[in-house]
Image: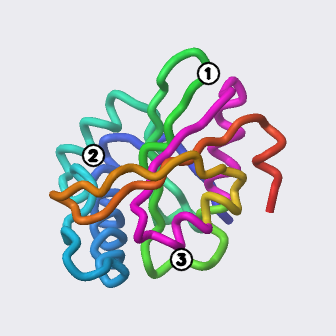
């Protein structure tokens, strides 16, 4: 069974472990010349504990075990950002992320619009977000420090969450 629950400071270490494994595993998909680091704080227990304390931060549970997480930023007036979502590589391709995002949408019924960004090289992320009803709105310029551009998405309206 898949569930999302609000994370607590006691979860920070396990969430950091799953995040580190996930973003390090993503490195095998990056093209040559790209920065091999992950997003800010992905490998820091302190960073994750800090965000758990100040923003909606969820653990993704598979049969009661933490296998990933979701960080949400409330931007005001019904606008939310899916700041980060990850599922440990050992648990990917089982529909866990899809169920977690559906539950996230349900947890924020007041949301009028969701936004997110993902790297241009992350084709499987883009496929996942589009499958969940997000619409690609633009691609950013290449960041010379990272070696890639970003792809920005938005999701508007409750009916899009039901698309498959």
- The region drawn magenta spans 99-127
On the picture, is 122 further left or further right than 54? Answer: right
- Name which of mark 3 and mark 2 comes first in the sequence: 2
* Image disc number at residue 141: none
Q: Position of residue 163 (x, y in %)?
A: 81, 56
Distance from Cα at disc 1 to Cα at disc 3:
30 Å
On the picture, is 131 further left or further right than 11? Answer: right
Q: Which residue lies at the image location 27% right of the left edge and 74% below the top edge? A: 24
Q: Please state which of the two labelled residues, at mark 1 or mark 3, is closer to the viewer.
A: 1
On the picture, is 47 further left or further right than 139? Answer: left
Residue located beneath label 3 in the image: 92
The reply to whether the magenta stretch includes residue 122 is yes
Please count the marks in the image. 3
User: Toward the viewer: 89 or 121?
Assistant: 121
Quadrant of the image for the C terminus? bottom right
- In the image, residue 163 sits, relative to residue 104, either above or below, namely below
Residue located beneath label 1 in the image: 78
Could you tell me if the residues under marks 1 and 3 are in contact, i.e. CB atoms within 8 Å?
no
Q: Position of residue 89 (x, y in %)?
A: 43, 78
Count neighbours of disc 2 (C-alpha within 10 A) and say few if under 14, some if 14 to 19, many if 20 or more: many
Instruction: Pick out the residue farthest to the top.
Output: 77
The reply to whether the magenta stretch includes residue 81 is no
Quadrant of the image for the N terminus? bottom right
């Amino acid at each position: 069974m898949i569930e999302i629950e609000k994370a607590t400071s006691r979860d920070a270490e396990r969430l950091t472990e799953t995040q580190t494994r996930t973003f390090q595993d993503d490195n095998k998909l990056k093209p040559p010349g790209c920065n091999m680091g992950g997003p800010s704080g992905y490998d820091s227990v302190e960073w994750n504990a800090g965000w758990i304390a100040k923003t909606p931060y969820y653990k993704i549970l598979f049969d009661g075990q933490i296998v990933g997480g979701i960080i949400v930023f409330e931007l005001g007036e019904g606008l939310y950002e899916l700041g980060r979502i990850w599922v440990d590589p050992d648990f990917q391709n089982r529909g866990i992320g899809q169920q977690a995002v559906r539950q996230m949408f349900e947890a924020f019924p007041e949301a009028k619009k969701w936004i997110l960004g993902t790297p241009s090289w992350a084709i499987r992320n883009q496929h996942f977000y589009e499958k969940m009803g997000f619409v690609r709105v633009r691609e950013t310029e290449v960041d010379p420090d990272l070696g890639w551009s970003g792809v920005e998405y938005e999701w508007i309206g409750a009916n899009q969450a039901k698309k498959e």
